[in-house]
Image (spheres, rainbow, N blue to C red):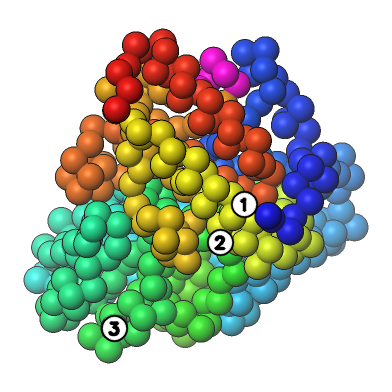
Amino acid sequence: MSELDVERIREDFPILRARQNGKELVYLDSAATSQKPRQVIDAVTNFYTGYNANIHRGMYDMSIKSTEEYQRSKELAARLVNAGSWTDIVYCRNTTDAINIAALSWGEPNIKKGDHILITDMEHHSNIVPWMMLARRKGAVLDHAGLVDKSFVDMDDFERKLESKPKMVAFTHASNVLGTITDAKKMTKMAHDAGALVLLDCAQTAPHMPINLKDIDCDFAAFSSHKMLGPSGIGVLYGKEDLLEQTTPAIVGSDMIRSVSFDHVDWNELPWKFESGTPNIEGAIGFGAAVEYLNGIGMDRIREHEKEITQYAMKRLAELGNVKIYGPGVDRMESRGGVISFNVTGAHPHDVAQIFNSEGIAIRAGHHCAMPLVNQVLDETAVSRMSFYIYNRHEDVDKAVDAIAKVEKVLRLKKS
């Protein structure tokens, strides 16, 4: 059993006392966005009611406090993922925005006609389309490494694709569909040995497990606050200091500028160099509170809780003869995060999600912004997905399994 006091943790989440269709809310969609504890809600409220002011510009107390809290959140984020320094943490809107900033700011001047960019078949659209568009603009080639067992990166194919000497290798740390956790350190070393830079999409790992970016040694990394108990509209682009220093920002103006004339501009120091305009100050402060909350629990304990509850869910689902599960099997829990994509034989995932909703259970159904993976690799039009976090219990899994019985009844499905 999990070491977390889940019932105690649940008391911190006001929304979990809500009811959906007259029933207790069972929230199983944290891979899309997490719920927020009162500590985060209070931090944002306190900013608005106590010291709402712009950062860096004011010489009065509220502005000074706002600036200090904004910077402190960066320090917390840097320590959470073991970045080199808080100055390596660039705030942006979300993971998607972070990857686009990297593709525009670094990619535009460095990718040339005929160059190669390498991704994998399990990427989210956010780690496909920015590189696709960059390749089209520059006349470059976008390669993608395949999967084995429809679950893991084919390392032989990955190695073959590296023979083309890509300039950039971008891949997910964990799939939002399969739950697969990639061997980021090994893949990063292989990419570096081939002369490439590496961007790591940490959207599905930063909220759920310890991350050591210095040890992985990736050049860029991206993750979002809203998936890790924090507000939406705030995310992180991590970059190695020397790389950020050498990179010219693509989105410009305001506080990112040290000095400007009509024919010259000097950029501000890191990380402000990449943060144009007034940022999402309240989001950053809420994000800092979220990181403090996660640290209070412990990322190791969070990871163990999710492994345990995911394993329990996979075993319960395996008892049903009409459910197909995608991704690593129950014997590969070290390589799986708290995500289970599945299909009920004879039922469309959208129907499954609607019937779950009638039981008060929130799950996701569709291609999960990973159409190449779902449509071409899994050969499905859509899949249902349940995903877990610190506030989920065995009871939630049991209710989901019971909801599948209702799917069978409502849709009049035959037992396998």
Callout 1: SS: loop
Q: Nearer the viewer, residue 110 or 81?
A: 81
The residues colored magenta run 354-360
Front-most of residues 320 and 94: 320
x, y percent for residue 18 = 72, 23
At horizontal 70% and vertical 71% (from top left) the residue drawn is: 75
Q: Position of residue 116 (x, y in %)?
A: 16, 71
Q: Is residue 17 left or right of residue 415?
A: right
Report the amino acid beneath label 3.
Answer: Met
Is residue 355 magenta-colored? yes
**Tag 3 or tag 2, which sits nearer the N-term?**
3
Determine crowd level at label 2: few under 14, some 14-19, many 20+ residues with C-alpha closer than 10 A: many
Q: Are marks 2 and 1 in contact (CB under 8 Å)?
A: yes
Q: Quadrant of the C terminus?
A: top left
Task: Give the CA separation, mark 2 to mark 1.
Answer: 7 Å
Q: Position of residue 61 (x, y in %)?
A: 90, 58
Residue 329 belongs to the span the image colors magenta:
no
Looking at the rendering, which quadrant does residue 158 occupy?
A: bottom left
Quadrant into which the N terminus falls: bottom right
The residue singled out by tag 3 in the image is: 190
- Residue at the outermost bottom position: 193
Identify the disc placed on residue 206.
2
Q: Is residue 146 above or below residue 243?
A: above
- Image position of 119 (left or right of 236): left
